[in-house]
Amino acid sequence: MKTPATAITVLFFTIIVTACSNSKKTTSSVAAEASVTGKKWQLVELMGQPVATAVNGKEPFIMFNKVDSTYAANGGCNGLGGKYTIDEKTMRIQFRQGMSTMMACADMTVEEGLKKVLGSADNYTVSDTALSLNKARMAPLARFKAVE
């Protein structure tokens, strides 16, 4: 009688441990995306150059909406937006531009640079207060800090 009871006990604990380890993976994946979404990220560096807190009187930023996988951004002149796909496990990201306003501003340098970054970034790194958009293993294309 001890052998079947022992086998059942071992099976029970195996199921519990497996279920807990799977939920931890899911939780960490959700935490990785949650750390990118739901925040406003102020652009602080573009192609290795510092970015002013205001360009043409506007704050350069990006925000990610988890619900519909859209992003909204501003490079200091026009509003930019589109869809993004993200893989939290591999830290891969891809942007697809969907819309942009068409205003002309005195300084379009940051906006043009941000558009290039969104078109070429393929991975990211993130902490609670910092986000970097990167291409391959090169230096970060853009750095952001969490605001609000």
Image (spheres, grey):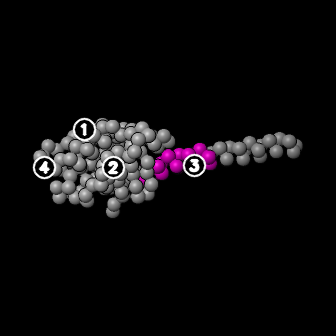
Residue 75 coordinates in the image, percent (x, y): 23, 49
Residue 118 coordinates in the image, percent (x, y): 31, 41
Q: Residue at x 26, y 42 (%)?
A: 115
Q: CA distance from mark 3 to mark 4?
A: 48 Å
Q: CA distance from mark 1 to mark 3?
A: 35 Å
Residue 108 coordinates in the image, percent (x, y): 18, 47
Q: Residue at x 35, y 51 (%)?
A: 143
Q: Nearer the viewer, residue 39 or 116?
A: 116
Placement of the N terminus among the 4 image quadrants = top right
Label 3 packing within 10 angstroms: few (<14), some (14-19), many (20+): few
Quadrant location of residue 101? top left
Amino acid type assigned to the residue bearing label 3 in the image: Lys
| Residue marked by disc 3 | 24
Residue 13 on the magenta segment: no
Taking the image as shown, residue 131 lies to the left or right of residue 78, namely right
| Residue marked by disc 2 | 48
Label 2 packing within 10 angstroms: few (<14), some (14-19), many (20+): few
**Residue at the limit of the structure toward the right, as seen here:** 1
| Residue marked by disc 1 | 98
Q: Earlier in the sequence, mark 1 or mark 3?
A: 3
Q: Main secondary structure of the magenta part?
A: helix
